[in-house]
Amino acid sequence: MDRMTIGRVAARAGVGVETVRFYERKGLINRPRKPAGAAFRVYPADVVQRIRFVRRAQQLGFSLSEARELLELRANPTIDTATVRIRERAAAKLSDVEAKIRQLREVRDVLRRLVATCPGQRPLQRCSILDTLEQKG
């Protein structure tokens, strides 16, 4: 099957119809014209792969605008700097993820200490969690 309705596209891509429409509004996929005399718009089969690409990019932490840029670079492989730019975007995203991991580890360590110092029994004054949350900065 070469062409599909929006419902079929959504089902094959593993998203809802509203996601397909949202991606159209954001310019991530083209909104096809309704063929003359047809009741529904029909989408080319490659739109499913494009939606999956965007979803996977989001899972890896890329924003929709970053996913759009990656799609544009993918569509224009003759651009001399395409590979360099794609790698730069991925390296920057990796750096962001590593920073978030460091931050989450710090939060985890603080929470572990707080949980360890609060007996979870009365009196409330012996639990340092609330005191720590009330501290400035």
Image (cartoon, rainbow, N blue to C red):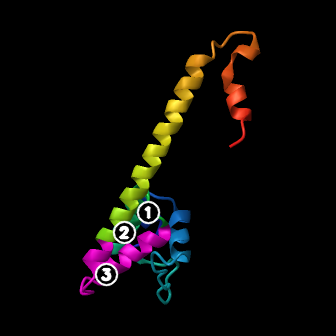
Let me know if residue 13 appears in the view. Answer: no
Q: Is residue 63 magenta?
A: no
Say left or right for 91 vs 137.
left
Of all residues, the one furthest to the top in this rendering is: 122
Distance from disc 3 to disc 1, alpha carbons, whole Å, reads 18 Å
| Placement of 111 over or under 93, stated as above or below | above
Q: Is residue 84 magenta?
A: yes
Query: For mark 1, what is the residue?
Result: 62
Q: Earlier in the sequence, mark 2 or mark 1?
A: 1
Give the structural element (helix, strand or loop) at label 1. loop
Query: For mark 2, what is the residue?
Result: 89
Give the extent of the magenta segment. Answer: 64-86
Closest to the observer, 22 or 110: 110
Query: For mark 3, what is the residue?
Result: 75
Closest to the observer, 85 or 111: 111
Q: Are marks 2 and 1 in contact (CB under 8 Å)?
A: yes
Residue 32 image offset from top left, x and y in percent: 47, 82
Three-letter amino acid code at the position of disc 1? Phe
Report the mark closest to the observer, 2 or 1. Answer: 2
Q: Which image quadrant is residue 133 in?
A: top right
Three-letter amino acid code at the position of disc 2? Arg
